[in-house]
């Protein structure tokens, strides 16, 4: 039997691979927000990816890149909606893509708030009381009853001036419709309209908006919404920018819609993904930056990162560090 020296196994000679040392924020002394955010990059694990994401967004802004922000409907459901409204109001992002849920819930919140609930709430009890649940957020059905009246009036106004409308104008007109709301400035839909920032909703016929389009179409057979112009607008914008950056919250259609368009220019220059998807399942959310490079959606360099984390924890840190604090320091 061959004798093995366990010391050689335990104390194998090593090479100093890697760059920089792992360390966290030094909480001694007065708190410094900039140093705190910068420390994420050296912390390790997902904090290091978050640190890289902050650096990439700062670079997007320094290089005056056109920033495409894509996000799923849960952003509208949660308080992240307020962060998106802030970025849109101050023209810090330049092109928005969301889902129907994100659009309609942003509008609904100009009427009534969503409320704190519980992940473990009894669904049957909620249904009996007319309360809808998204995660631990409760949405009274009254909000959707109001939205039915809002959409009914909106669609009648649109139909009175034209029998057909394209989806880009449809969303822009929804923003215009909020002019009369006292809470309009809370809405990213309103600020996108007010500041002339494109806001695409894909797919428009999903969710409550899809319900109202269905009912309206039954009574107005000649009414139609053209989807082609939104693709033309997105592609023309992609082809017309010198530098492009993408911040993509979640997966689904918004992420793919933006990244697919960016193939036309041999990829986006800077990419930040925020989601909890795994690539092993072959999902759009799980697809990482290396996969995007294979399609030509992202440039073949290291100016991209995926932060594996729940967006309500991650995105506010990016907004604070790469937008709010960055502007205050520059």
Image (cartoon, helix red, strand yellow):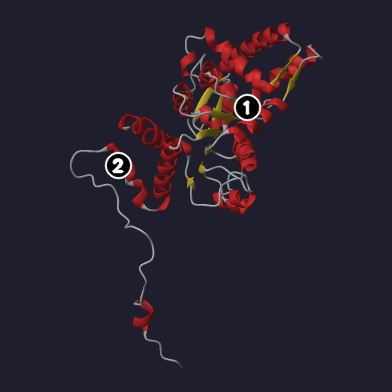
Viewed as shown, does residue 237 lie left or right of 19?
right
Q: Which mark is residue 36?
A: 2
At a point 70% along the width and 8% down the height, the residue shown is: 156
Dot 1: element: strand
Residue 302 % position (x, y): 49, 51
Q: Establish if 49 lies above or below 164.
A: below
Q: Quote the CA–CA distance across marks 1 and 2.
A: 36 Å
- In this view of the protein, which residue sits in the foreground, 171 or 233? 233
CA neighbours of label 2 inside 10 A, class few (<14), some (14 to 19), many (20+): some
At a point 63% along the width and 10% down the height, the residue shown is: 149
Q: Establish if 15 lies above or below 147.
A: below
Residue 6 % position (x, y): 36, 82
Viewed as shown, does residue 232 lie left or right of 125?
right
Q: Residue furthest left?
A: 29
Please name the residue that numbered disc 1 is placed on: 201
Name the quarter where the C terminus is drawn.
top left
């Amino acid at each position: 039997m061959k004798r093995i020296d366990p010391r050689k196994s335990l104390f194998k000679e090593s090479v100093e691979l890697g760059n920089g040392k792992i360390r966290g924020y030094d909480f001694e002394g007065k708190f410094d927000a900039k140093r705190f955010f910068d420390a994420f990059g050296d912390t390790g694990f997902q904090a290091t990816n978050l640190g890289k994401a902050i650096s990439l967004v700062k670079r997007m802004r320094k290089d005056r890149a056109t920033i495409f922000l894509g996000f799923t409907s849960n952003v509208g459901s949660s308080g992240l909606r307020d962060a998106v409204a802030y970025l849109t109001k101050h023209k810090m992002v330049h092109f928005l893509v969301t889902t129907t849920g994100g659009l309609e819930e942003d509008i609904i919140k100009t009427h009534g708030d969503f409320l704190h609930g519980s992940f473990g709430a009894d669904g049957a009890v909620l249904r009996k009381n007319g309360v809808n649940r998204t995660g631990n957020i409760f949405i009274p059905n009254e909000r959707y009853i109001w939205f039915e009246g809002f959409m009914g009036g909106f669609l009648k106004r649109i139909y009175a001036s034209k029998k057909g409308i394209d989806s880009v104008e449809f969303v822009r007109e929804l923003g215009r419709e909020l002019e009369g709301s006292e809470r309009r400035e809370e809405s990213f839909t309103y600020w996108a309209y007010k500041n002339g920032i494109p806001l695409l909703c894909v797919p428009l016929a999903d969710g409550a908006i899809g319900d109202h389009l269905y009912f309206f179409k039954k009574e107005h057979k000649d009414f139609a919404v053209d989807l082609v112009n939104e693709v033309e607008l997105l592609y023309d914008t992609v082809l017309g920018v010198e530098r492009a950056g993408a911040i993509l919250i979640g997966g689904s259609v918004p992420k793919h819609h933006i990244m697919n368009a960016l193939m036309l220019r041999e990829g986006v220059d800077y990419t930040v993904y925020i989601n909890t998807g795994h690539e092993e399942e072959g999902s759009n959310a799980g697809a990482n930056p290396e996969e995007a490079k294979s399609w030509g959606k992202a440039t073949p360099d290291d100016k991209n990162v995926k932060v594996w984390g729940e967006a309500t924890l991650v995105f506010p840190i990016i907004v604070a560090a790469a937008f709010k604090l960055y502007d205050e320091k520059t």
